[in-house]
Structures are given as structure tokens and as C-alpha cells.
Amino acid sequence: MTLLDGPLNAGVEGVTVVGPREHHIYQPLLSHVAGGTAKASQATRPQADVMPDRVTLLRDAVASVESETSSVVLASGRRVGYEHLIVCPGIEQDWDSTPGMRAALSTPSAASSYEIGLADKTSRLLRDLRGCTAVFVQAPEPASFAGAVQKLMYLACEYWRSRGLLDSIRDVLVLPDASPLGIPEIDEELERRIADYGIEVRRESRLSDVLPEAKTAVISAPADSDSGAGSGSEPERIPYDALIVEPLQRAPEWIAEAGLAGASSREDSERGFVEVDPRTLQHRRFANVWALGDVAVSRSQRSGGALRKQTKTLAEN
């Protein structure tokens, strides 16, 4: 959450960043930590160390936004007024929506790249696999770069191949859609990689349940799907030795409570997110409110690559 309360370099001064974290985590690096090509220590720094000069950091969380009075209420009870408000809290990971997932993550056999501790766990888990089954689950939209799990999966496959282990490991990828990323040029190359590594794919499918004691992933598919995961019949149960998951994700609840979300008729994947003009990133109803990153409804995929473009657009406008 950023508050701009005056005319910085290009005419703006008095920038305040509101954020509760003591440490900044560079999220794009976590898939490389999970894939064994980076260290967890490389992905984190003290939050104060990444603040630009002349920017004030308030270590607090946003409780609510009062757009009509141009003010923000913080978790501490403090109220802060703003001239312009940039809403960028990211997206929330919903570990509890999939039954059994949180319990599974407390076992040695399940992990994720979406939290720094779990990413480090993922690296160790995949490195030590021998002659067993690894299941990788990609999250459906909305998600912060759904598909990051594929990065670490390909890194793991290359590692296993280099050590003569690939043929002894059953590798299963669960996709929410028919193709890996939905971008034809990229999908073509990814499909070649999937075939080359011998990865089994469950398309248009979801992780509907995890049975941690039985080390079993329950995979469901729509009734009209040809995913190979049952095609509408009984869910498929896949015993696993390693389960690597992207969690379901959602917008922070206070976005809708503050009246910043789009219309309820919008497609499910965009409900609860900040309604902006995708050309300018300005809120459609509040002229001094802006949004970027995972929380904004734009035409871009929720990813670091999109965010870099958005920051330039927002600054210019």
C-alpha cells in the first residue's frame, strides 16, 4: 500500500509505503529456490533496505480504506490521509480451501514454492527422491503467476536426468486448463519439454483433496473434460512421495469492504479485485485511487513481468 501525499522526482514528494513485513521476499526467485538453483538467503532482505531514498516506511497493515474521505485506517488504529492512493497488497494464499492441504504441508512429503520456508523444503524433498512419484499442482486463476510450479518441475526433471534417475520417477502435472500456460507460442515449447521428460499431465483438473496420512492426492476433473483424470467420473487418487502445490488464491477481503472491487457480475476469477482502467491503472470510480500488481483487474497475467510494465504505466499517469 503506497500513499502519495505531495508533488518525487517527476514532481512527486512525500511517499509513504504501508506494509506489515519485517523482511522483503523476492517472490520470483522462490521457484528457483524450490528447484535447487538458488538459496533461500538470496531471496530475502530487511524491508527497510529495499526502500528508496525519501520514502517513509510504516510497518503496519491496512484494516480499511475510506475512499470518500481519502484516508486509510491501519491495524494499529492509526488513520492516514492521502492525496493519491496506490493499492498493491498482492494476493492472498488460501491454504485451507483444499481439504487436507495444510495438514499435508506439515508432513515431510508435501511442499510449495509460494512461501520461502516451503520453497527450501521443496528443494530438499525433490533432491532426495529415488524411484517414486512426484505430483505437481498448478493453481487455477486467480493466482500470482500460476505456472511457477512448472519452473521447478523442469529444473527437477533436468536434475534427475543428469543423475540417471528420471526414468525411475513418475512425474505427474495437474493443470487447471487444457494447455500449460494459455500462450500458444510458449505452450508449444512447454509441450515439447513435457513429452521429453515423460511427464504425465492431468488437464482441466483440480486438486480437490489431500489425504496426508495415506500420502494420496485426489484429482477431480469437470464432467465434460478429456483431461485423463476421470473425465467426470470418480476422482482419481494418486499416491505420492512428493506433492508440490500452488495454493488456491484470492483477493484480500478488505478490497471489497472498501468498495474498491469491481461489479459482482464480473467473472469469478476477478471478483474482489480492484477495478481499474487497464490502460492507466486508475480506479474507475475514484480518481485518486490507483492499483497495480496481483490485486488489479487488468488484461495482464498476474506476474512479475506484468508488474514491471504496470509500474511505468502508473507512474506516467
Image (cartoon, rainbow, N blue to C red):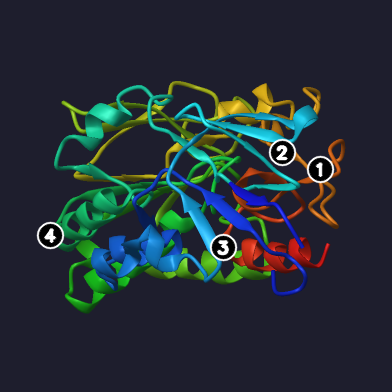
User: Depth-wise, is mark 4 or mark 1 nearer the camera?
Assistant: 1
Residue 101 x/y as whole percent = 32, 30
Query: Which residue is found at the position 30% from the left and 70% from the top?
Result: 42
Crowding at label 4, few (<14), some or many (≥20) Cα neighbours within 10 Å? few
* Three-letter residue code for mark 4: Asp
* Residue at which label 2 appears: 274
Per the model, the C-alpha gap separating discs 4 and 1 is: 48 Å
Give the crowd class for mark 2: few <14, some 14-19, many >=20 residues within 10 Å.
many
Residue closest to the eye, 196 or 295: 295
Give the CA separation, mark 3 to mark 4. 30 Å
Using the image, tell me which numbered label, if any, was put on residue 128.
4
Tell us which disc is closer to us: 3 or 1: 1
First in sequence, mark 3 or 1: give its number: 1
Q: Quadrant of the C terminus?
A: bottom right
Whole-angstrom CA distance, mark 3 to mark 2, is 18 Å
Image location (x, y in percent) of residue 286: 84, 38
Q: Quadrant of residue 28?
A: bottom left
| Label 4 or label 1, whichever comes before in sequence order | 4
Label 1: which residue?
283
Camera-near label (3 vs 2) is 2
Which amino acid does the dot numbered 3 rest on?
Gly
Say if mark 1 contacts mark 2, CB within 8 Å: yes
Q: Earlier in the sequence, mark 3 or mark 4?
A: 4
Instruction: Judge left or right: residue 24 versus residue 58.
Output: left
Reading the image, the residue beneath label 3 is 304
Looking at the image, residue 142 sits to the left or right of residue 38; the answer is right
